[in-house]
Image (cartoon, rainbow, N blue to C red):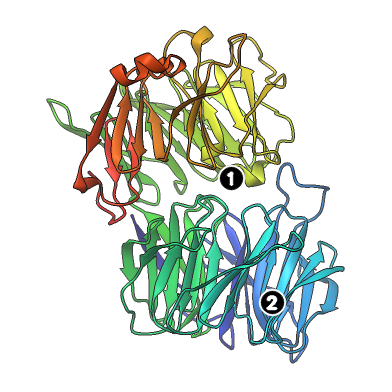
Amino acid sequence: MRFKLSLAEKPSHKAPVTCVGWSSTEEFFSAGDDGLILSWSASTLAATKVAQLPESCYPTDMQFLTNRAGMAGKHQELILLATADGKFHILNKSGRIERSVDAHQGAILSSKWANDASGLLTAGEDGLIKTWSRSGMLRSTVVTSDSSIYSACWSPDSQAVAYTHGKCIVIKHLTPNTKPQRWKAHEGLILCIAWSSASELIVSGGEDCKYRVWDSQGRQLFSSGYHSNHITSVAWSPTGDLFAVGSFDVLRLCDYAGWSMSLDNPSTGSIYQLSWSPDGTQVAGACANRKVVIGRVTERESRYERYLAYVTGERTVVVKDMGPEPTEEVLEVGERIVQIEMRYNNLVLTTPGQCYIYGTNNWNTPAIFDLKDGSVILMLLCEKHMLIVEKSTVGIYNYQGRLIASPKWPKMRLDTLRKSQISLSPDTLGVRDSIDAKTVHLTDLSSNRTSSDFTSIQHSIPIIEVSLDQSGDPSDRTLAILDRTRDLHLVQFRSSNKQFTKLGRKIESFQWSATHSMIAAIQDTQLVVWYCPSAAFNSKLLKLCSLQYESVELGRDPRINDFVVTFKKISGLTL
C-alpha cells in the first residue's frame, strides 16, 4: 500500500493551515491562522468558505463529532475548535458558533471529543488538562502539570487520557486514586501522540526526529530511524491497521507495527495536523505553506486461495488467478473504491454509494446494490452471506445482493464497533457487548430473520476478540474468545452446558480455518495448529491433535493473516 497525493495548485488560505477534520467520507474542513474555515471536496479539492473567525482568533486544533448509531442522545454535527487565546468553540456545520468557553491561560494546544461522544478534553500551555461535557460545562481538571502539554488523547474506552510531558508520555486514568502510568518515550520534546481505539496502540512523534509505537502498558514496539526534521503530526486510521506521520515536506504511511509502507515528499512545509476520513481510505494534512494535502491509500489487496485482487487506481481493481492457467481481469467501477474483500469465491467492492459483488466464475456481470448511508465501516464475508456495517445501519446480504437480515443487538453502538468484536458464520452472528466487555451476544440467522432476538453468554474476564468457526454442523457451532489475559477459550453455545474451556494461553493472534474446524494461533514463540479444537473439552485428547512449529523466523509479535498460513512479522515481512 502507498499514498497517492493530491495538492491544491493555489493556496486557498492566506496564512498557514493549522488544523483539518472530516465531516464525511467526501468532505473535510480546514482552519488556518487567517481565521478562515473552509470546506473541501475530497475528490476535486474545491474549497468553499464556511466562516470567518473573529480577529486574533488563531485555531490550533479541530475535530468533528458526527451522528453515529448508538450514540447517547441525538445531536447535530458539531465541530470542536480550539484557539490560541485559551478558548474552545463548539460550532455547527454551517460555521455558526454555538458556544465559546474560556478554558485555559495561554493557548489550547490539543482538544478532542471522547470516543463515546460523552464529552471532550482540552490541554493547554498552562499545563492543565480539563474534561468538559458535550455542551461545554466543566467536569474536572484531570491533570495539573509543571510544563505545557503539547498533545493529549483519549483511551479507546474514554476512561483514561494519554498526554505528553516533556520527553515522557503519561496515562492518567479518570478513576480517582489511580496512579498514572509514566515512561520516557523520546530523547527530545514530544510534539504529538495518537491512541488507536481499534488496535489500542499509541504512536508518538517528537523533536528527536523519530516516531515510536507503544502498547498501552508503555512497552516500545517500534522506533523509527532519524528524519531530517521534527515529527509534527501522527494519526491512526479508524481500523487501526495503518497510521500516518507528518514532518517538514514529509508524509509517511506506516502499518500498525510501525514499518513504513510509503514515503512522499510533497512541497508542503511542516504538516501541522493529520486527519483520516471515516472510511480509512484518505488522510488530510494541514500544511505550513497555506495548502492542504490529501493522501489516498492505493494498492490495497485481498488474497483468497489462488486469487489476488488489488486496487491499482481509484476506480480500478486487478484480479489475478494464479492457478495452473494464470489469467488476469481488470475491473472498473463508477466511483472511488473504499473497501475490497475476497472470500469464498466472491469479490466484494464498496464505493461511497454502492456495493459490487463479483463471482470468480463470472467477472462481467456483478450484483450491485445501493448502500443506505454511503459510509461502510466494516465488512465480513462467510460462505453463505456477508455483513456490511455502515455509519448507522447493519445489513446481512446474500451474494446476489439481497438483504436477508438487519441485526439489532442489545446496547448496539456502531461507532465503537471493531472487526475483532464481531464474527459471522453461515448460521450465526456473534458480537461483543459495547459496554460490558465480558458479554457476547449471539443470534441464529437461519431461524431469526428479524435478527433482534439475541442470547447472551458471559465470560469472567474482559474479551478482546471473538470468532465463530465456519464449518461443521450448526448444532456444534463453536465460539472462540481471546480475553485480556491472552487466554483462548472455546464454548459450544448451543449445548445445554455453556461453559468456557481453555484451549491455550499466551495467545498473540488466532484464526479459524475457512473450510474445516481447525484453529491456527501464535502461542508465545510458537505457531500452533489444533486439528480438532473440540478436543479441548477433553484434556487427554488435546495434545494428540495439535501441531507445534517453533522457528526463529517468526520473530517477535507475529500476526496470523489467513489460514493458508501466512503471518506478518514485526519487521514488516510476510511469510
Q: Residue furthest left?
A: 324
Specify whether 282 is left or right of 80.
Answer: left
Q: Position of residue 516 (x, y in %)?
A: 35, 17
Specify whether 276 is left or right of 308.
Answer: right
- Which quadrant, please, contains the C terminus? top left
Taking 99 as reference, is 56 above or below it?
A: below
Q: Are marks 2 and 1 in contact (CB under 8 Å)?
A: no
Taking 186 as reference, is 199 above or below it?
A: above
Q: Position of residue 36 (x, y in %)?
A: 67, 81
Residue density around tag 1, few if under 14, some if 14–19, many if 20 or more, within 10 Å: many
Determine whether the residue tagged by mark 2 lies in a helix, strand or loop.
Answer: strand
Residue 178 in which image quadrant: bottom right
Q: Residue at x 25, y 46 (%)?
A: 554
What residue type is disc 1 on? Ser
Give the residue pinned by disc 2.
123
The disc, 2 or 1, on the residue closer to the chain's N-terminal end is 2
What residue type is disc 2 on? Ala
Q: Residue at x 31, y 27 (%)?
A: 529
- Which quadrant, please, contains the N terminus? bottom left
Tell me how far mark 2 sits from mark 1, CA to CA: 31 Å
23 and 510: which one is in front? 510
Give the residue pinned by disc 1.
375
Taking 514 as reference, is 194 above or below it?
A: below
Residue 261 in which image quadrant: bottom left
Q: Nearer the viewer, mark 2 or mark 1?
A: 2
Residue 17 in which image quadrant: bottom right
Residue 8 appears anywhere in the view: no
422 and 313: which one is in front? 422
Q: Position of residue 382 (x, y in %)?
A: 45, 24
Specify whether 494 is left or right of 556.
Answer: right
Determine whether the residue tagged by mark 1 lies in a helix, strand or loop.
Answer: loop
